[in-house]
RNA sequence: GCGGGCGUCGCCAAGUGGUUAAGGCAGCGGCUUGUGGCGCCGCUAUUCGGGGGUUCGAAUCCCCUCGCUCGCCCCA
């Protein structure tokens, strides 16, 4: 391509689509506010070290997906691939945790150098929450419910909540050892990817999509069996809590999640509308992370939801049910008034009028073309506006404006330009 | 990073070696120099993502490259 274009996997958001985004953003903001979560914004760029220490060296995200470069001061910088590490860093840097638990949410772009496909881009957007200092199982339930309810309020159906427990770091380590020992006996039966992961990230072998590997894993030791009593009880408490709230879930012992910092509760919300990249929202507990990044050991839980994927699901929901919540939320808004104007004096008056009407809160499209009235009416009609206001030099000279309803049968009327409030009155109460 | 499919106007799309690259939508202009939604007429790609090659001749074949897309991997 000789023409200038965006970088691969980097996507422009155009006005029509952004309207849907804002509907989601607004809904999310409300939910967070009502649940006592405060917004936090952190830089898109962090030291590479933050992600290496936070996410884990053995993960794919750190190993091969980061946008990393050296700045002019020769510091290694990385465009954030996820939000949690940054939020924790900010909380520590500003001493937030010394004021007690923090309930935070964020929204913004994340960057991962991967091959784009359906529901996957190199710059994508997440909305997420982090509850730092959340200890008890009931906070797991509350945080999961927050995600579930947000999605429900957007009218997104057909979602599946999958749940697992990774136990404590010790449980996980013990299980990891047991699993590796078991798999090493059978290494030659594993696919090549899984063989490589034996040393790098053995737990990920569990959700390999290779059929032979999956068959082999049928008899492998399970994570659930490796949980200590306390972990097991904790997990059961989370399940009871979700059931009490009427939130359906499915246990998925293979749900491991890619980032090192998870412990205990891990969950994903998936949709069958998304193809291979089915996860809309994923999260879990990360009791070890804050300590690992230099803070006092502090339990925490959070999740992130993928904006692009959510909008795909939302679009599908809107198409499936044009009368439903999703369709209503994402419907394109239309201007209320279209000002048809032509002639030097009329154009001056029209601009002033449009300004007044906008100040009064109306969405006013002002035709700026100066073309024939017929053309302007055609555009007025296509704009979807309820009203055309007509201003030619005749009206301007008389200090009047004509109000023409575009959507109903009512007659066109002429009113004085003078008190704009009177015009607004007429426009709003037809 | 690895495989498969694809790339013709802002959008959708015909065309698979032979004179001027269909059509639809949108846009612009006109019929209608002050009144829209319908209709009719006209205009809008010297060019087929880009580069190179084969050929008398290529959007159509070959190579490279860029991009999109689906899947793997991984995740949101």
Image (cartoon, coloured by chain):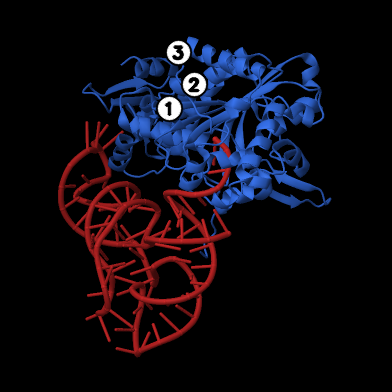
Chain colours: A blue, B red
To the question of a shared chain for discs 3 and 1, the answer is yes
Q: Specify which label sits upstream in the sequence, 3 or 2.
A: 2
Residue at image point 37% right, 34% down: A316
Q: Are marks 3 and 2 in contact (CB under 8 Å)?
A: no
Give the quarter of the image for residue A169.
top right
For the residues beneath circles 3 and 2, the answer to whether they share a chain is yes
Q: Locate residue A381 relative to residue A305 in the image: left or right.
A: left
Q: Are marks 1 and 2 in contact (CB under 8 Å)?
A: yes
Count residues near mark 2 (Cα–Cα under 10 Å), then give few for <14, some for 14-19, many for 20+: some
In the depicted structure, whether residue A7 falls above or below residue B63: above
| Residue A258 image position (x, y, % from top left) | 61, 38
Question: Which class describes the residues within 10 Å of circle 3: few (<14), some (14-19), or many (20+)?
Answer: few
Residue B56 as seen in the image, left or right of residue A239: left
For the point 53% across and 27% down, which residue is it? A25
In the picture provided, is A345 more to the left or to the right than A179? Answer: left
Q: Is residue A390 visible?
A: no
Query: Label 2, on which residue?
Result: A148
For marks 1 and 2, give the CA distance. Answer: 9 Å
| Real-space Cα separation, disc 3 to disc 2, in angstroms | 11 Å
Q: Which residue is mark 3?
A: A246
Residue A159: image location, x then y, percent: 43, 27
Q: Residue furthest right?
A: A73
Q: Quadrant of residue A388?
A: top left
Res A159 label:
1
Callout 1 environment at 10 Å: few (<14), some (14 to 19), or many (20+)?
Answer: many
């Amino acid at each position: 391509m000789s023409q200038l274009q965006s970088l691969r996997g980097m996507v422009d958001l155009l006005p029509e689509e952004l309207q849907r985004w804002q509907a989601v953003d607004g809904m999310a903001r409300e939910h967070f506010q009502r649940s006592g979560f405060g917004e936090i914004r952190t830089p898109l760029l962090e030291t590479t070290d933050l992600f290496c220490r936070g996410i884990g060296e053995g993960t794919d995200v750190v190993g091969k997906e980061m946008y990393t470069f050296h700045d002019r001061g020769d510091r290694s910088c990385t465009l954030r691939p996820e939000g949690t590490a940054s939020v924790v860093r900010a909380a520590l840097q500003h001493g937030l945790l010394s004021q007690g638990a923090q309930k935070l949410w964020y929204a913004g772009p994340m960057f991962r150098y991967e091959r784009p496909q359906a529901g996957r881009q190199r710059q994508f957007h997440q909305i997420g929450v982090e509850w730092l200092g959340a200890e008890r199982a009931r906070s797991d339930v509350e945080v999961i419910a927050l995600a579930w309810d947000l999605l429900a309020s957007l009218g997104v159906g057909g979602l599946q909540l999958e749940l697992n427990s990774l136990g404590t770091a010790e449980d996980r380590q013990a299980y990891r050892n047991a699993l590796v020992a078991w798999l090493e006996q059978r290494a030659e039966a594993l696919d090549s990817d899984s063989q490589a992961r034996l040393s790098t990230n053995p737990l990920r072998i569990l959700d390999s999509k290779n059929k032979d590997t999956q068959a082999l894993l049928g008899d492998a030791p399970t994570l659930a069996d490796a949980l200590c009593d306390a972990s097991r009880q904790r997990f059961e408490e989370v399940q009871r809590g979700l059931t009490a709230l009427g939130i359906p879930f499915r246990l998925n012992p293979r749900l491991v999640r890619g980032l090192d910092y998870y412990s205990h509760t891990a969950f994903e919300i998936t949709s069958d509308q998304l193809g291979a990249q089915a996860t809309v929202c994923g999260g879990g507990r990360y009791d070890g992370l804050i300590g690992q990044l230099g803070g006092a050991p502090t339990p925490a839980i959070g999740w992130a939801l993928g904006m692009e994927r959510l909008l795909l699901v939302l679009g599908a929901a809107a198409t499936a049910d044009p009368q439903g919540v999703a369709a209503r939320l994402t419907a394109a808004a239309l201007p209320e008034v279209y000002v048809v104007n032509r002639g030097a004096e009329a154009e001056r008056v029209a601009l002033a009028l449009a300004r007044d009407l906008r100040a009064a809160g109306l969405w006013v499209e002002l035709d700026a073309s100066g073309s024939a009235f017929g053309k302007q009416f055609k555009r007025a009609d296509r704009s979807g506006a309820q009203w055309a206001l007509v201003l030619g030099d005749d009206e301007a000279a008389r200090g009047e404006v004509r109000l023409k309803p575009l959507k109903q049968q009512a007659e066109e009327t002429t009113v004085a330009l003078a008190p704009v409030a009177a015009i607004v009155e007429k426009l709003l109460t037809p």
